[in-house]
């Protein structure tokens, strides 16, 4: 009986030792991907890499960018996965993202990759803005369907429009940058001043204006095209409009922070794989991998409406643009939750 107890105890100790020896390495991954995407991406990676676990740290693009900049002298992230290209360009300039040559880079669309030498960020997908228009609310309120950005300046839309605060939302900054780059500085700021007269409020989430339009809190949400497509597929009474004048867009990208971690490098490599891009394609019709291009239901023809975007300019001018915007328009922002 004593020997049996000893053998049992030794077996238990051995099992605990084995469990400890093969405990998965945990990676801290900073992201601005929508929360409903994270579980799928985590599962896909961990199934392919069972010795590594992901710990997500998630917030909107503006807040996540500010967090990474604040932690510059003491980085806490291993990888940034799912952050706007303009933010990634800024993080590279600040030395937070490190140059890396990932496996599979030759299969990624060139216009979604860091254009500079010593490449440090690599596109997973492209995301686009749109106008989400609630047809039921519009009918009840007697609101016409807008066809262009200029249409949104009409007095009939006063108090019926929501859009993201660009200081806290990459989606918001993307559209502000698109107006500046397509209209020119003076005309864009003049446009935004007129638009502000019709704005009900600014949100701190890029997808929220479309969600609010979908449930009828506002008639119009300047928001993410992908969120509009999803809500429409779920039955929301919305039309997804590509306004005349073109929409802003960006690449969501991946980049390496912790160069000492082989696991972090494996995550960057896997994020560019065909398997990973197949997962992105469930949410985005335009993804990084050249061979993955399945259409997404109710998604508009965004590529015809793309404004030419200079991501480096967006990165360099970000601080000044956001200060100017906040000084002019932040009073209508929703309280932060």
Image (spheres, rainbow, N blue to C red):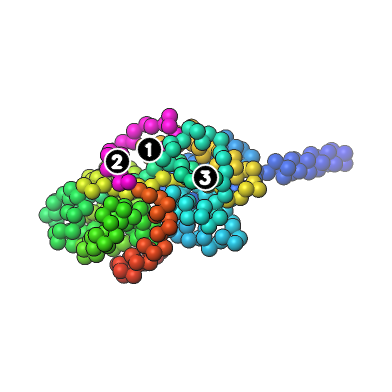
Where is residue 72 drawn, in percent x and y? 56, 60
Relative to 328, residue 150 above or below:
above
The structure residue drawn at horizontal position 21% and vertical position 47%, both measured from the top left corner, is 244
Question: Residue 203 — which label?
Answer: none
Reading the chain from its start, which is encountered first: label 1 or label 2? 1
Reading the chain from its start, which is encountered first: label 3 or label 1? 3
CA distance separating discs 1 and 2: 9 Å
Q: Tell me the residue that label 2 is attached to.
A: 302
Relative to 278, residue 210 above or below:
below
The structure residue drawn at horizontal position 48% and vertical position 32%, both measured from the top left corner, is 107
Q: Nearer the viewer, residue 155 or 10?
A: 155
Where is residue 100 drawn, in percent x and y? 57, 43
Question: Residue 286 — which label?
Answer: 1
Q: Is residue 270 left or right of residue 224?
A: right
Reading the chain from its start, which is encountered first: label 3 or label 2? 3
- Residue range highlighted in magenta: 287-308
To which quarter of the image does residue 333 belong? bottom left
- Name the element at disc 2: helix
- Name the element at disc 3: loop
The structure residue drawn at horizontal position 46% and vertical position 44%, both measured from the top left corner, is 115
Q: Is residue 101 left or right of residue 300?
A: right
Where is residue 324 drawn, in percent x and y? 34, 66
Is residue 215 in sight in this rendering? no
- Name the element at disc 1: loop
- Quarter of the picture holding the C terminus: bottom left
Q: Tell me the residue that label 3 is attached to.
A: 117
Q: Is residue 314 left or right of residue 268?
A: left
Badge 1, how many Cα within 10 Å: few under 14, some, many 20+? many
Relative to 187, residue 302 above or below:
above
The secondary structure making up most of the magenta span is loop
Q: Is residue 20 left or right of residue 230?
A: right
């Amino acid at each position: 009986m004593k020997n049996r107890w000893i053998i049992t105890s030794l077996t238990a100790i051995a099992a605990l030792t084995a469990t400890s020896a093969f405990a998965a390495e945990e990676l801290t991954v900073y992201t601005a991907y929508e929360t409903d995407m994270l579980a799928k991406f985590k599962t896909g990676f961990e199934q392919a890499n069972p010795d590594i676990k992901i710990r997500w740290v998630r917030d909107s693009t503006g807040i996540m960018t500010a967090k990474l900049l604040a932690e510059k002298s003491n980085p806490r992230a291993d990888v940034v996965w799912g952050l706007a290209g303009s933010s990634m360009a800024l993080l590279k300039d600040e030395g937070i993202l490190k140059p890396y040559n990932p496996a599979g880079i030759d299969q990624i669309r060139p216009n979604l990759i860091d254009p500079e030498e010593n490449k440090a960020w690599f596109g997973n997908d492209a995301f686009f803005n749109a106008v989400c228009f609630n047809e039921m609310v519009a009918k009840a309120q007697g609101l016409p369907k807008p066809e262009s950005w200029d249409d949104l300046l009409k007095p009939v839309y006063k108090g019926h429009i929501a859009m993201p605060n660009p200081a806290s939302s990459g989606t918001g900054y993307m559209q502000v940058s698109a107006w500046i780059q397509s209209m020119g500085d003076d005309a864009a700021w003049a446009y935004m001043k007129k638009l502000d007269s019709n704005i009900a409020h600014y949100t701190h989430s890029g997808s929220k204006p479309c969600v609010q339009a979908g449930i009828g809190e506002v008639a119009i949400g300047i928001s993410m095209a992908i969120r509009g497509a999803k809500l429409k597929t779920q039955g929301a009474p919305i039309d997804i409009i590509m306004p005349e004048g073109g929409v802003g867009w960006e690449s969501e990208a991946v980049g390496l922070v912790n160069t000492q971690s082989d696991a972090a490098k494996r995550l960057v490599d896997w994020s560019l794989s065909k398997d990973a891009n197949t997962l992105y394609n469930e949410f985005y019709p335009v993804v990084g991998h050249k061979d993955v291009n399945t259409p997404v239901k109710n998604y508009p023809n965004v590529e015809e409406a793309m404004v030419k975007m200079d991501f480096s300019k967006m990165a360099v001018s970000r601080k000044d643009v956001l200060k100017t915007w906040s000084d002019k328009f932040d009073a209508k922002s929703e309280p932060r939750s």
